[in-house]
Image (cartoon, rainbow, N blue to C red):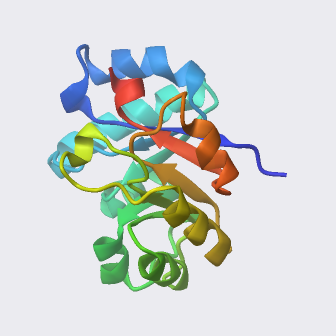
Amino acid sequence: MCTFKKILITNRHICKIPLIDRLEKALPYADMVILREKDMKEAEYELLAKEVINLCGSYKKECVLHSFTDVAVKLGHKKIHLPLPLLRKYGGALSDFDIIGASVHSLEEAVEAVKLKATYLTAGHVFETDCKKGVTPKGIDFLKEICEAVPVPVYGLGGINDSNEELIKMAGAKGACRMSDYMK
């Protein structure tokens, strides 16, 4: 039986302390980290990825790299998360990876991502969030529809906190992604 995962998505821009220090404080409360620093230069991301992979290992937490497939291959890291346009670009040709996550924002995208070999999905944004100011949230029914339609784990994303996380579970999600709670 799959336990409900608490997923930390990084964003060094909202940390008040260095990202590694923030991760040290947050890792005891998370099950998985998605290193989502996609605005970095590749060489800079590679250095950070090495450090974060080691840190996650020391806490026995799962680490998933984001967008930088070449870095993941170079590091021999078999877990990658991709926005759907990047997943489309690779067209399912991602044999270097055991875990392939994809970000989706509709049922059609979820079905497509699974056909492109995604092994898990993040679906959102479910609730109102500062990351998507002014954009109407998709809601619990959206999340439930995706959870029921695909054969891979779906993790809710967007505006999730302690007071609404139970709704994510009830919708059938296998986990909840949080950025702000962990990064601040």
Q: Quadrant of residue 128?
A: top left
User: How many callouts does the rendering have?
Assistant: 0
> In the image, residue 101 lies at what x, y percent?
49, 62
> In the image, residue 108 lies at what x, y percent?
44, 82
Q: Is residue 50 above or below residue 170?
A: above
Q: On the rendered image, what quadrant is the C terminus found in?
A: top left
> In the image, residue 121 lies at what x, y percent?
52, 63
Q: Is residue 33 above or below residue 163?
A: below
Q: Is residue 172 above or below residue 17?
A: below
Q: Nearer the viewer, residue 95 or 39?
A: 39
Q: Quadrant of residue 16?
A: top left
Q: Nearer the viewer, residue 103 or 47?
A: 103
Q: Is residue 119 visible?
A: no
Judged from this view, the residue extending furthest toward the right is 1
Q: Name the residue rendered at 48%, 31% in the picture.
A: 161
Q: Name the residue rendered at 40%, 26% in the picture.
A: 181
Q: Is residue 111 visible?
A: yes
Q: Quadrant of residue 151?
A: bottom right
Q: Name the residue rendered at 44%, 49% in the picture.
A: 157
Q: Name the residue rendered at 37%, 18% in the picture.
A: 22
Q: Nearer the viewer, residue 72 or 136?
A: 136
> In the image, residue 1 lies at what x, y percent?
85, 52
Image-based side of 94 in relation to 38, left or right:
right
